[in-house]
């Protein structure tokens, strides 16, 4: 037997037994695919897998830095793959990493290092990474990630508490998730005498019964109309079917005894504080049809449940479609907090990186960001001359990593679906009730992030705008922008393009920036040839600068 110090990596799939029970063949197929991803990253990081059992993977690394970097790469890659599945069918790893003294025997590793890594994996969040203090000391200043200190943790079969840290996973927008901090072990000056245990158990049991009863009736009054979400896509968070109301009406429940002062207060309840936008943005009356980001089911729930409820109440959302509401709260602050907390839990459950914010208090909108910028309708004009099968490799203004996410996410996503694009990123919506709903939600979320209207580039499995292949896309084209061509030609360019009802369009300019415009052409090359020909009638050195809705340059 050989002893050595190694960084030990332990991973397994959260809820694997349930996934197998629901659909064994599909789960095993995806496990093989996901294991290929993990195995490749482990090998790339210089690691060695020394044991596997079902969904579990144990690996050793010569470097703690490489072990943590590998874990982050795995989680980010698998998170992208999971975007194509509803939360109930997502396959996410928990990963634990420590540095320890281990014994090698016939290629396998044994010892406390392996056991502690496995226990840290159990502490990790779904899709998260938990590391020991020894690993944190090695990687804290070497990797551009953040950590949450969760303190000393008692873990099974390890005699002393393990000091652990959660890795804060970086989101696509550059911000970091906030790990749920586990309750640390509290230091104690002595042990509880054995004779006290019966009394402690009795007190705890009675307390649990009392608290359970309180929470039960509190839940009936405050959350019965807001059940946990059913998520049918990587973006869309919708409420579950509304349960039947409690069989015991509120007015039939025994009323507690009250003092004269309490009765007087009950007769004249305090008026809610008029809602004020945190940024001073003028407020407006809540109109359910105008609420952005949410889907039709949530809109129906707002109409039937929230709008009819009295104060104190609040509604929160994020631009990924997660939402939460609270009614019949004791104060406005309580309503705000409850709605935000419910929304954030729903957002976290589907891996949405966007923060929840209060949209309405009572029946008044207090959302500080206003309505997301949207393009004019129609968002898409059916046109067989420009439509073609969607291919992630042809997606304009998107890097290779983004194209890979499109392949595993959008391509595999359930229709109806739509893909919106701005100059910096894209936003997709899957599994909606209608194509119009998918387009609206994609445009709202994309516009809110971009700060300007986005465009729909794909619906279901086809591109619905001209996607240039002869030249490289460099940005969006705005016909009113006169920087490409001479200012005096702007109105004429806008007039010609506005009259186009389909097909391929193109703009070419010469040395004097005099434009040539081609519209309603049957192909990309026809549009290029026509634009250059028109430009050559009034200028020299003509070259194409616009194809369809994009500015272009040489490949």
Image (spheres, rainbow, N blue to C red):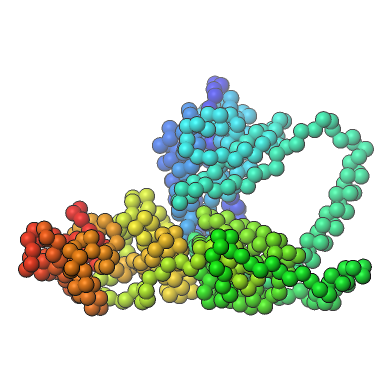
Give the total of numbered labels: 0
Judge from the rendering whether residue 513 lies leftward or rightward of residue 228; answer left or right. left
Q: Please provide percent x and percent y for residue 122.
A: 63, 43
Judge from the rendering whether residue 495 lies leftward or rightward of residue 4; answer left or right. left
Residue drawn at x 20%, y 53% is 555
Q: Please provide percent x and percent y for residue 536.
A: 7, 65
> In this orientation, which residue lies closer to the viewer: 363 or 168?
363
> In this orientation, which residue lies closer to the viewer: 174 or 245?
174
Q: Is residue 536 above or below residue 116?
A: below
Residue drawn at x 63%, y 47% is 180
The answer to whether residue 266 is visible is yes
Residue drawn at x 61%, y 71% is 364
Picture quarter with the N terminus: top right
> In this orientation, which residue lies closer to the viewer: 145 or 277?
277
Q: Is residue 483 above or below residue 435?
A: above
Q: Is residue 428 above or below residue 168?
A: below
Q: Please provide percent x and percent y for residue 247.
A: 78, 76
Q: Please provide percent x and percent y for residue 184.
A: 70, 39
The answer to whether residue 429 is visible is no
Residue drawn at x 36%, y 60% is 422
């Amino acid at each position: 037997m050989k002893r050595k110090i190694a960084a030990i990596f332990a991973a397994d799939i959260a809820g694997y037994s349930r996934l197998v029970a629901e659909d064994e063949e599909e789960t095993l197929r995806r496990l093989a695919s996901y294991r290929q991803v993990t195995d490749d990253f482990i090998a790339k990081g210089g690691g060695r897998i020394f044991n596997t059992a079902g969904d579990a993977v144990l690996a050793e690394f010569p470097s703690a830095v490489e072990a943590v970097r590998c874990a982050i790469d795995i989680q980010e890659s698998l998170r992208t793959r999971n975007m194509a599945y509803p939360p109930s069918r997502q396959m996410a790893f928990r990963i634990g990493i420590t540095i320890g003294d281990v014994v090698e025997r016939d290629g396998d590793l044994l010892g406390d290092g392996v056991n502690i890594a496995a226990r840290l994996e159990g502490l990790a969040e779904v899709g998260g990474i938990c590391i020991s203090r020894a690993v944190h000391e090695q990687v804290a200043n070497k990797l551009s990630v953040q950590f949450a200190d969760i303190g000393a943790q008692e873990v099974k079969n390890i005699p002393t508490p393990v000091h652990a840290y959660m890795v804060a996973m970086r989101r696509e927008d550059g911000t970091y998730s906030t790990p749920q901090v586990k309750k640390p072990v509290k230091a104690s000056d002595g042990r509880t005498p054995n004779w006290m245990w019966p009394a402690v158990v009795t007190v705890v049991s009675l307390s649990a019964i009392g608290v359970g009863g309180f929470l039960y009736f509190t839940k009936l009054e405050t959350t019965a109309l807001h059940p946990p979400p059913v998520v049918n896509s990587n973006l869309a968070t919708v409420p579950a079917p509304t349960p039947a109301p409690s069989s015991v009406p509120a007015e039939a429940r025994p009323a507690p005894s009250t003092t004269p002062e309490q009765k007087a207060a009950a007769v004249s309840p305090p008026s809610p504080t008029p809602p004020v936008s945190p940024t001073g943005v003028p407020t407006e009356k809540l109109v359910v049809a105008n609420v952005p980001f949410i889907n039709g089911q949530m809109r129906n729930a707002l109409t039937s449940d929230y709008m009819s409820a009295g104060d104190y109440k609040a509604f929160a959302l994020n631009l990924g479609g997660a939402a939460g509401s609270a009614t019949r709260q004791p104060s406005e602050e309580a309503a705000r907090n409850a709605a935000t907390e419910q929304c954030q839990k729903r957002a976290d459950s589907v891996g949405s990186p966007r923060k929840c914010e209060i949209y309405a208090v009572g029946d008044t909108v207090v959302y500080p960001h206003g309505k997301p910028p949207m393009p004019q309708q129609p968002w898409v004009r059916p046109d067989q001359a420009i439509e073609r099968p969607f291919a992630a490799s042809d997606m304009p203004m998107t890097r290779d990593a983004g194209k890979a996410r499109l392949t595993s996410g959008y391509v595999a996503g359930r229709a109806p679906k739509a893909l919106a694009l701005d100059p910096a990123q894209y936003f997709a919506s899957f599994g909606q009730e209608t194509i119009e709903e998918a387009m609206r939600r994609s445009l709202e979320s994309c516009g809110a992030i971009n700060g300007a209207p986005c465009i729909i580039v794909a619906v279901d499995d086809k591109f619905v705008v001209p996607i240039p292949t002869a030249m490289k896309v460099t940005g969006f084209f705005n016909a009113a922008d006169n920087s490409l061509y001479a200012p005096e030609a702007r109105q004429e360019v806008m007039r010609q393009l506005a009259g186009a009802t389909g097909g391929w369009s193109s703009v070419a300019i010469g040395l004097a920036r005099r434009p040539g415009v081609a519209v309603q052409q049957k192909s990309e090359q026809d549009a290029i040839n026509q634009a250059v020909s028109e430009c050559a009638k009034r200028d020299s050195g003509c070259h194409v600068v616009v194809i369809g809705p994009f500015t272009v340059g040489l490949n």
